[in-house]
Amino acid sequence: MKTLPRRRTPGIWSECREKLRHVRLRRSVGPYADGELTGAARARVAAHISRCWVCSGTLQTLRLVKSSLRRGPQRAPASLAAARLHRYAHRLAGSAPESPADGGTAAPGGNRPPPDRPPAP
């Protein structure tokens, strides 16, 4: 009886190659999103992203995060310590602090309750 040579399944090897490509190229998704890649490297990563749902999801997440950071506040809010120092300095000077946190409505002289609350006993 004549035995036929075993045929290798081409799907397994192509799948393996794609996994190796993914391992090599997944680190390039961030630089690709930032526009740091040029030429052949950019084309390789773009081709991989078009086939790999994990990397395309990562790219989409990076783009969403970057766009939300661009739309965010342009300056950092004042720290609590800085706000307290500012309020204390105004209290010592005898003037009301004008801070966005309290809308500039703090009374001179300290921590008086707002007019809608009765004073504490």
Image (cartoon, rainbow, N blue to C red):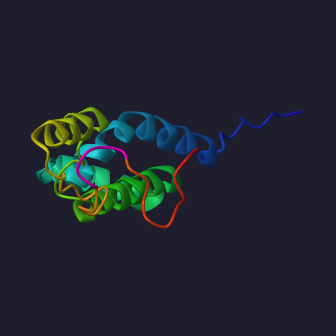
Q: Give the quadrant of the C terminus.
A: top right
Farthest residue to the right: give it: 1
Say left or right for 83 vs 92.
Answer: right
Quadrant in the rendering for residue 79: top left
Say left or right for 36 vs 6.
Answer: left
Say left or right for 24 vs 14.
Answer: left
Labels in figure, total: 0
Identify the residue shown where x is 41% and y is 40%: 21
Q: Is residue 109 magenta?
A: yes
Q: Range of the magenta residues? A: 107-111
Q: Is residue 110 magenta?
A: yes
Identify the residue shown where x is 27% and y is 63%: 103
Q: Position of residue 30 (x, y in %)?
A: 29, 45
Identify the residue shown where x is 23% and y is 56%: 43
Q: Give the quadrant of the N terminus.
A: top right
In depth, the one of 23 and 117 nearer the eye is 117
Q: Position of residue 82 (x, y in %)?
A: 21, 36
In depth, the one of 38 and 107 nearer the eye is 107
Q: Position of residue 36 (x, y in %)?
A: 14, 47
Q: Position of residue 75 (x, y in %)?
A: 17, 52
Identify the residue shown where x is 65% and y is 39%: 8
Dominant SS of magenta comes to loop
In depth, the one of 45 and 59 nearer the eye is 59
